[in-house]
Amino acid sequence: MASDLTVHEFGGFRLEVGERRLLCDGRPVSLTTKVFDTLRVLVEHAGRLLTKDELMHNIWPDSVVEENNLNHNISVLRRALGEQATGQRYIETVPRVGYRFVAEVKRSGSAAAAPDRARSVAPVATLRQTIRFSTATDGTRIAYSTVGSGAPFVKAANWLHHLEYEWESPVWRHWIAEIAQHHTFVRYDERGCGLSDWNVADFSFDAWVHDLETVVDAIGVERFALLGISQGGAVAAAYAARHPERVSHLVLCGAYTRGWQFRGDEREIEARSAIIKLVRLGWGRNNPAFRQLFTTRFIPDAGPEEMEWFNDLQRISASPENAARFMDEFSRIDVRPLLSDIRVPTLVLHSSHDGAVPFDEGRRLAAGIRGARFVSLPSRNHLLLEHEPAWEIFLRELGEFLGWA
């Protein structure tokens, strides 16, 4: 938080933190206490996406308030800053996530040179992602982003995904930063989650493959490397089987060939069916204990910051009904008949003690693709974290496979 001597200047405005005063061309602008606090927090983190929970925690640290209080403050701020009258844009809304202060801010005072801790660890310190939308054949809008430069590397969408929210996350930012150093990295939110359309009728596996086709056609690349993580691995494998001429390299991590209904474990089927029912009842509620159930399956060795972020991602990325539909459709995935049709260089990596997808599924996947190289990663995490040795192994193998310098 800025000191009392800090002054922020943007446009024709001057925000004096210690005096709790906003000036426009030297004239005071009247703001209530909480509206001023809303502006202060946004400006102090200019350029960074702040979730609604973050904002409410900072503005009402000792109270529990409804989200419409924050929405009201943002509306009042926009009028006070004259956004509609002047056309100048200061506050960007990221639907279903939060807000970002987008105007250039000049700081002076004792805290002017102090680094923003949250921003210093985020890829946006050196990278910028561009988000656009493509439209699938059934009219569903799919949000996709590009970042970095170089040969294109496309990541097939996986569940629990949000282009904006994951940009500064402790779970995904190292993936983005490392890959974007070598490639134009393309990611997208699959239908039903993130910034893509949530209200969709077709939740089928074929629709997911068509969405990948839609995105790569929209970015206009003829040939690219393709990454599939978790159920995104099955989507990537199906695409590579259908379009071998467009995939230069196929990378599959924590992926599987068949959903849990085909694995023949009655206890697992019963347990996962029960979880789907719980999801329809409890997903999205402000209950960390419920969300922690999923977090510990995906990243059991995560630290507090990583677990908290992943807990919030579940609530932000999808509705309860869509989350249940995803899980139900995952159970029916079966790409085993397609594996023999894959004729592209393939690297398969899998955590040796993956709690979300059994290690043997990774072995099955590699065995089914002719010439595929299989790498076991010493980890319990389904999603590799930056601090673990498995991440360094993953990068070394990936760089060697894709020809990084």
Image (cartoon, rainbow, N blue to C red):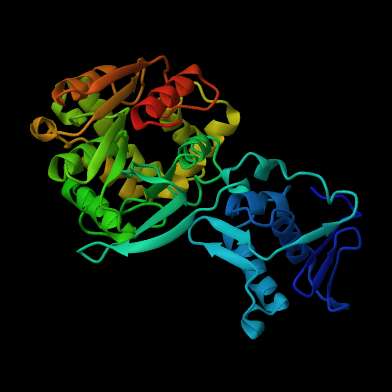
Residue extending farthest to the bottom is 85
Residue 74 horizontal side relative to residue 106, left or right: left
Quadrant assignment for the C terminus: top left
The quarter holding residue 198 reads bottom left
* Horizontal and vertical percent position of residue 243: 16, 45
Figure check: 47 above or below 235: below
Residue extending farthest to the front is 405
One can see residue 60 in this view: no
Q: Residue at x 57, y 26 (%)?
A: 303
Residue 403 horizontal side relative to residue 342, left or right: right
Name the foreground residue: 136 vs 289.
Answer: 136
Residue 331 horizontal side relative to residue 338, left or right: right
Q: Residue at x 46, y 46 (%)?
A: 315
* Horizontal and vertical percent position of residue 164: 49, 52
Name the foreground residue: 55 vs 254.
Answer: 254
Q: Residue at x 63, y 49 (%)?
A: 54
Residue 107 horizontal side relative to residue 247, left or right: right
Figure check: 301 above or below 127: above
Figure check: 125 above or below 93: above
Q: Residue at x 63, y 53 (%)?
A: 48
* Horizontal and vertical percent position of residue 270: 22, 27
* Horizontal and vertical percent position of residue 278: 34, 38
